[in-house]
């Protein structure tokens, strides 16, 4: 059974993508605060969160790797038309001129896989991809990835598996940690140990440092693959 692991990076749409009514809606919670300092702080927090919502942000990169062969692609927004390969030539970096092309290329690959592995993909990556594809009018070839939460077929979300489906809530023994934390505990090279995090994506995109975003996204995927192999060997099957 072919297994695909993937991760996405997102970046907020420009300010002029929204009209006055939309900004009023986005800032409504902040503008209700009576204290001016608190109001401005809340506004700044909302702006920082724009890249987390598929109606206010776009997909700028998707990295994907075949778990069994370690081969894959990184699709990323860039004005550069030249593709490149990573150091061991197993993953090709493919620049895309726009989000619609990026999404269409991803779904063309995804349709060949029966099984998908993510970290928090059910809660973030998959619904983000679905909604952005709908916005761009891109055909979705796999509409079953939200799936039944308590099953690893066709989608194994490690954030669900490593918390045993959130069995103990936020404070219990199986509370959820981020990918960086799991990697460090299990002895995996953390994607954040190379100087770039998800919070840097907006700035990197604004500065035209597209390949750095792509390389960071690929590190996320490689870490997810390593964590998946540990889960499969040591924890899979626990009920």
Image (tube, helix red, strand yellow):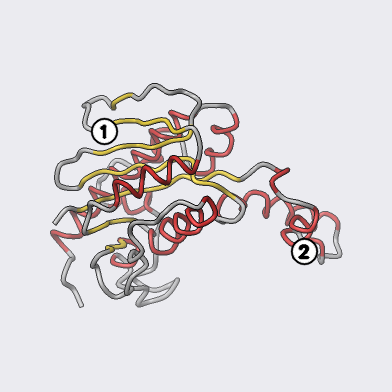
202 w.r.t. 125: above or below: above
Q: Quadrant of the C terminus?
A: bottom left
- Residue 206 lies, in percent from the top left, at 60, 32
Q: Nearer the viewer, residue 172 or 15?
A: 15
Mark 2 residue element:
helix
86 w.r.t. 144: above or below: above
| Contact (Cβ within 8 Å) of mark 2 with mark 1 | no
Identify the image quadrant of residue 175.
bottom left
Within-10-Å neighbours for mark 1: few <14, some 14–19, many 20+: many
Report the side of 64 relative to 209 (left or right). left
Q: Nearer the viewer, residue 206 or 184?
A: 206
The residue at which mark 2 appears reads as: 28
Q: Quadrant of the N terminus?
A: bottom left
Marks 2 and 1, the one that precedes in the sequence = 2
Q: CA distance from mark 2 to mark 1?
A: 44 Å
Report the side of 202 relative to 91 (left or right). right
- Residue 98 lies, in percent from the top left, at 51, 37
Q: How many marks?
A: 2
Within-10-Å neighbours for mark 2: few <14, some 14–19, many 20+: few
Identify the image quadrant of residue 61.
top left
Q: Which mark is residue 172?
A: none
* Residue lying at 60% horizontally and 45% vertically, measured from the top left: 12
- Residue 16 lies, in percent from the top left, at 73, 43
Identify the image quadrant of residue 53.
bottom right
- Residue 13 lies, in percent from the top left, at 62, 44
* Residue lying at 34% horizontally and 64% vertically, measured from the top left: 145
The residue at which mark 1 appears reads as: 91
């Amino acid at each position: 059974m072919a297994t695909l692991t993937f991760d996405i990076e997102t970046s907020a749409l420009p300010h002029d993508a929204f009209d006055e009514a939309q900004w009023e809606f986005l800032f409504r919670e902040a503008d209700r605060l009576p204290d001016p300092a608190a109001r401005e702080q809340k506004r700044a927090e909302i702006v920082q969160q724009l890249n987390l919502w598929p109606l206010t942000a776009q997909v700028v990169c998707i990295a994907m790797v075949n778990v069994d062969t370690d081969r894959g692609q990184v699709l990323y927004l860039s004005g550069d038309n030249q593709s490149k390969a990573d150091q061991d030539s197993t993953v090709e970096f493919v620049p895309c001129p726009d989000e619609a092309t990026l999404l269409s290329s991803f779904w063309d690959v995804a349709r060949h896989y029966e099984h998908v592995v993510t970290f928090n993909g059910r809660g973030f990556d998959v619904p983000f991809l679905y909604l952005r594809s709908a916005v761009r009018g891109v055909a979705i070839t796999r509409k079953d990835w939200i799936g039944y939460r308590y099953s690893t077929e066709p989608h194994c979300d490690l954030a669900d598996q490593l918390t045993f489906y959130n069995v103990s809530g936020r404070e219990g023994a199986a509370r959820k940690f981020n990918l960086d934390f799991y990697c460090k505990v299990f002895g995996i090279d953390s994607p954040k140990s190379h100087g770039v995090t998800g919070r840097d994506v907006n700035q990197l995109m604004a500065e035209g440092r597209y390949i750095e975003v792509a390389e960071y996204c690929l590190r996320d995927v490689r870490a997810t693959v390593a964590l998946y192999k540990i889960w499969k060997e040591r924890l899979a099957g626990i009920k």
